[in-house]
Amino acid sequence: MYQAPEHFLSTDAAASRLLRHARLLAELSRRFAAAAPGPLASSARVANFRSGKVVILAENGAVAVKLRQLGQRLCSKLSFEGAECSEIEIKVQPRQTPFRSMGSTKKPISRRSVDNLETAAKGLPEGDLRRALETLLRRCAKEE
């Protein structure tokens, strides 16, 4: 007979407490998403609940300040049967996003621009600027 994993979690005392706490946090998260204004709700998340205190993590300081201003209103909207919110603690913690390097994109230079750069390079005295333009023109010629 099939029994859902939830059945096994509810039979063990420690796992049962953990499951109840997870459900409580899920409900608080839903209530927070509904209670907070749109941009704030997407820039913050409920992290924990303990002894009447809801801990909310904000992505940056500006979001944290605004959430602190709305603290009492949010606290009353987060309260529900079995979870009375008496205090909200706001912490700043940026979301972890994996670093992705952006490859450079090659943008072609038009023939007219190449001709203008060649003319400009020929009119310059020997020096760093002329060498830089000549290097750019050689690279353009390779790409064509």
Image (cartoon, grey):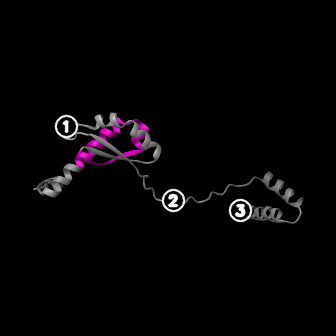
Quarter of image, res 11: bottom left
Who comes first in sequence, dot 3 or dot 2? Answer: 2
- Compare residues 132 and 60 and report the one nearer the observer: 60
Quarter of image, res 124: bottom right
Quarter of image, res 119: bottom right
Quarter in which the C terminus is drawn: bottom right
Quarter in which the N terminus is drawn: bottom left
Q: Amino acid at mark 2?
A: Arg
Is residue 112 toward the left or the right of residue 32 in the image?
right
Between the C-alphas of marks 1 and 2, the distance is 44 Å
- Compare residues 53 and 6 and report the one nearer the observer: 53
Return the residue at label 2: 100
Return the residue at label 3: 143
Labels 3, 2: front one: 2
Q: Which segment did they paint magenta? A: 22-51
Return the residue at label 1: 81
| Kind of element beneath mark 1 | loop
